[in-house]
Image (cartoon, rainbow, N blue to C red):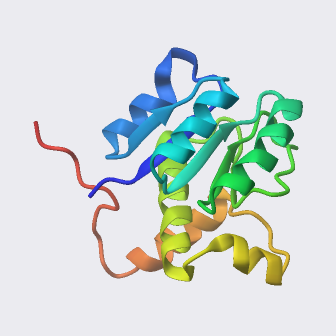
Amino acid sequence: MSSTVAYFGHDYCNLRRLVLEYSGFNVKYCGLSISTLMNELRSSPVEALLIDGESEEVVSQVLGLIHAQSSAPTVLFASTAESSAPGFDAAIPPYTLPGDWVRLIATAIEGAKNTGDLKVEKSKQSREPLRVNNVRKKAAAAAAGQPRALFARRSR
């Protein structure tokens, strides 16, 4: 079964949306419309909220609204390598390979499923958002001694 994610922000050339859909995600694209995002969150649950971090002012405004509507993990596509990600469950630095950020999103979703609710866990202890390097280390540790693909190719 595919995971449903909501994407808020610019997606130039639909690159992120296409990569996510090819990887098996169902993407609800909201553009820069806060009302569309809120309607999507009210109409059906999503397993993750993906936000483009190009405009920090919009991101901070949207983040507060999102946390009031959903307990799904939030993932920031950071606009600069120095971008901090307070309030996000995961952060993806610029120029990250698509395979790496797809794995990071899948890890955030799986973490939410395993803990039941990441927001409750975050209130108990302050923790750094997931980073791509941490996901690479976990994937390498899981695959040690077991050569297998992390994602199966879709058959046509």
Q: In the image, is residue 21 above or below residue 141?
A: above
Residue located 63% across and 57% down the image: 70
Tell me residue 93's x, y (percent): 71, 44
**Quarter of the image with the C terminus in it:** top left
- Count numbered badges in the picture: 0
Tell me residue 124's x, y (percent): 81, 84
Tell me residue 112's x, y (percent): 55, 71
Q: In the image, is residue 98 above or below residue 44?
A: above
Residue located 59% across and 48% down the image: 49
**Residue 113 placement, left or right of 26:** right
Question: Which of the 4 quarters of the picture holds residue 60?
Answer: top right
**Residue 88 placement, left or right of 73:** right
**Residue 75 placement, left or right of 63:** left
**Quarter of the image with the N terminus in it:** bottom left
Tell me residue 91's x, y (percent): 71, 52
Question: Which of the 4 quarters of the picture holds residue 86?
Answer: bottom right
Residue located 71% across and 70% down the image: 119
Residue located 42% across and 49% down the image: 4
Q: In the image, is residue 15 above or below residue 62?
A: above
